[in-house]
Amino acid sequence: MTTILLVAPCVACLVAYCMAWVLVTRRVVTDRRTADTIALVEATDRLPGLSILKPLCGADEELEPNLRSFLEADHEPLQILFAAADADDPAIELARRLASEYPQRDVGFVVGADETIPSPKISLMEAMLPEAKHGMLLLSDSNVRLDRGDLTRVLPLFADPRVGMIYQPVVAEGERTVAATVENLHYTEFAAFLTIGVHELVGLHTVNAKGQWVRRTALEAAGGFERVRDCGADDYELSQQVEKAGWKLAPAATVVRVIQRDWSWKNLADRNLRHAGLRVRICPWAYPLELLFNPVPFAALLLLAGRLDVAAFGLFAIGAKVAMELSSARLLRGRGLAWHLVPALIVKDFFIFACWFVAPFKRTAVWRGRVYRLLARGRIAPLTGEAGGLPIPLETVV
């Protein structure tokens, strides 16, 4: 009986992960085979204008090549808006310098934000929105690296007038430290592999802000950014509001890339505990299901069972999970993982397993140097109980 209780969770998790792996592999391969058809649509149909809203805060790693990739995008008409809360923020200074190298680009800058809004990112989005010229919006974080052609591969999905929001699977790459490797592998697994897998399996949309596109009329129908001012997971909540307003959500085949190179273990713990703490508060019934896609800790227990056959199955389960994740990461990221970093896959699974148990008991989270209280339904509030000081006057330069 004890053996069955040990083996059953491992088998269930391995079967769930294998099902997801099959569905994701089939979907990604199918999407790539239809790339030529999509390219034909891009070539023959005039695509709509696009405004990119990009909030900035500090000199993040790889910021210059990330911003430059947007300035070199191959779509017109295109407008890029950069925003920062502080005029002396090095990120906005860098954006101004880079924009001067592309005088043909329609680039605008917004400085200042309403500090009474709990979410600093949403306060900048609200500040940029009045300056946006086009009916399609791309909400994009500072660590996103755009590949040439990405915009014209995603925009055709708006040809369906019922589509109010498009979201892309997110892959993370560029790791140089073990902590960054753990984060990038987890991000790719959670925001790309499981995003595709869950949609294929049960049709649910799990939207990530790294590649979130929204039709302006759909945003307005959903109540605008004002509806998510105090949401820790504003990307997911905004998608829910758009869907409730009667618009369709559409997953894109094109992945969006984030670059994360030199992370510390503290960065890793802060981010994952914050995200897990939000998920358990947003959807408590779904939170336990996350364990279904992490067979490694359960398989490790089998190694201690004292039976050779059970231990052998545990080793098989670990090997199978590692092999499937290596293949899916290569498929999604477009390159394999360096062999000396493969052990990070197992470290990652144990780390995420530990975070899963700790997060429900966390009452606060650190985000961009500020401490927030985690509230019901994924709401956030500054630890002081106040959102901040007086609004900073907005200065717009277009």
Image (cartoon, rainbow, N blue to C red):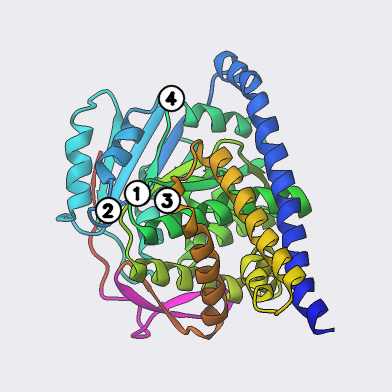
Visible residue check, residue 320 = yes
Residue linked to disc 1: 142
Mark 1 and mark 2: Cα distance apart in space: 7 Å
Q: CA distance from mark 4 to mark 2?
A: 26 Å
Above or below, 269 relative to 161: below
Nearest the eye: 45 or 345: 345
Q: Which residues are magenta?
A: 369-389
Q: Which residue is mark 2?
A: 60
Q: Residues within 10 Å of mark 2 (few under 14, many from 20)?
A: some
Q: Secondary structure at mark 1?
A: loop
SS at circle 4 = loop
Seen in the picture, residue 226 relative to 65 is either above or below; the reply is: below
Callouts 3 and 4 close, C-beta under 8 Å? no
* Residue assigned mark 3: 340
Percent from the top left, x then y, of residue 221?
Answer: 60, 52
Per the model, the C-alpha gap separating discs 3 and 4 is: 39 Å
Seen at 27% across and 46% down, the residue is 63
Name which residue type carries label 4.
His
Earlier-in-chain disc, 3 versus 4: 4
| Residue named by callout 4 | 75
Label 1 with label 2: CB-CB less than 8 Å: yes
* Disc 1 versus disc 2: nearer the observer: 2
- Residue 201, percent from left and from top: 77, 52
Q: Is residue 246 visible?
A: no
Give me the C-alpha separation between circle 4 and circle 1.
19 Å
Q: Is residue 47 above or below residue 342?
A: above
Disc 3 secondary structure class: helix
Report the amino acid beneath label 3.
His
Relative horizontal placement of residue 140, taking residue 237 as reference (left or right): left
Q: Earlier in the sequence, mark 4 or mark 1?
A: 4
